[in-house]
Image (cartoon, rainbow, N blue to C red):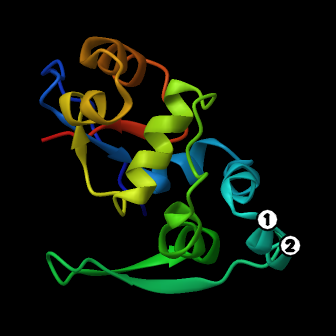
Amino acid sequence: MVEEKKHSLIKPSVNSPISIDFDWWKKHDNNWRVYLHSCLCDEHQEQFSDLEEELLYDLIDMQTGEISKIDGLQHILISHCAKQENFITPNTTIVDTVFRLLIINGNRPMTSNELSDKINRPAQTILRTLAGPRVYKGIRPIQQ
């Protein structure tokens, strides 16, 4: 039985870590693989055109040495597509930009202040968008 994460009574701040909770996203959105597929580079969109097949890969966090299993789409997105020059464009929405920045960062948590520095948007705007009652693409503050 998978344990649902509890919501914290502590209100997140601009210094609270934020990451993509893929487990939450998989549980609450049947189309998560479709979105990940849309983020792939052209080369890999063609290679992963069959969204039915779900391959698992080992992901090693080079800072902690922790090994986790991730979906093949996540793996290729993190290891290749996120490193492409046009992965983030000036027309990318704030939620998509944050999602892509977290992917570029290997989904290591970032604060609203850190995200603000990278995307030149106010940290409070980022926090209000991502720490509200609605969860976008699994992006949410980490409960500590």
Q: Give SS at disc 1.
A: helix
Residue 136 in sight from this viewpoint: no
Q: Left or right of 9: which side holds 4?
A: right
Whole-percent x, y for residue 122 in the image: 30, 14
Kind of residue at badge 1: Asp
- Most extreme residue toward the front is 85
Query: Crowdedness of circle 1 by 10 Å Cα count: few (<14), some, many (20+)?
Result: few
Residue 52 in sight from this viewpoint: yes
Q: CA distance from mark 1 to mark 2?
A: 7 Å
Residue 33 to residue 99: above or below: below
Where is residue 111, by image quadrant?
top left
Which is nearer the eye, 125 or 69?
125
Which is nearer the eye, 86 or 137?
86
Query: Crowdedness of circle 2 by 10 Å Cα count: few (<14), some, many (20+)?
Result: few
Q: Nearer the viewer, mark 1 or mark 2?
A: 1
Instruction: Give the mark count.
Output: 2
Whole-percent x, y for residue 14 in the image: 17, 23
Where is residue 67, by image quadrant?
bottom left
Where's the N terminus, which quadrant? bottom left
What's the residue at 56%, 57% (across, down)?
A: 85
Which is nearer the eye, 72 or 124?
124
Residue 42 to residue 11: above or below: below
Kind of residue at badge 2: Glu
Where is residue 131, by image quadrant?
top left
Whole-percent x, y for residue 44 in the image: 75, 73
What residue is disc 1 on? 42
What's the residue at 36%, 19% (across, down)?
A: 121
Q: Left or right of 130: which side holds 90?
A: right
Q: Give SS at disc 2.
A: helix
Q: Are marks 1 and 2 in contact (CB under 8 Å)?
A: yes
The circle drawn on residue 46 is 2
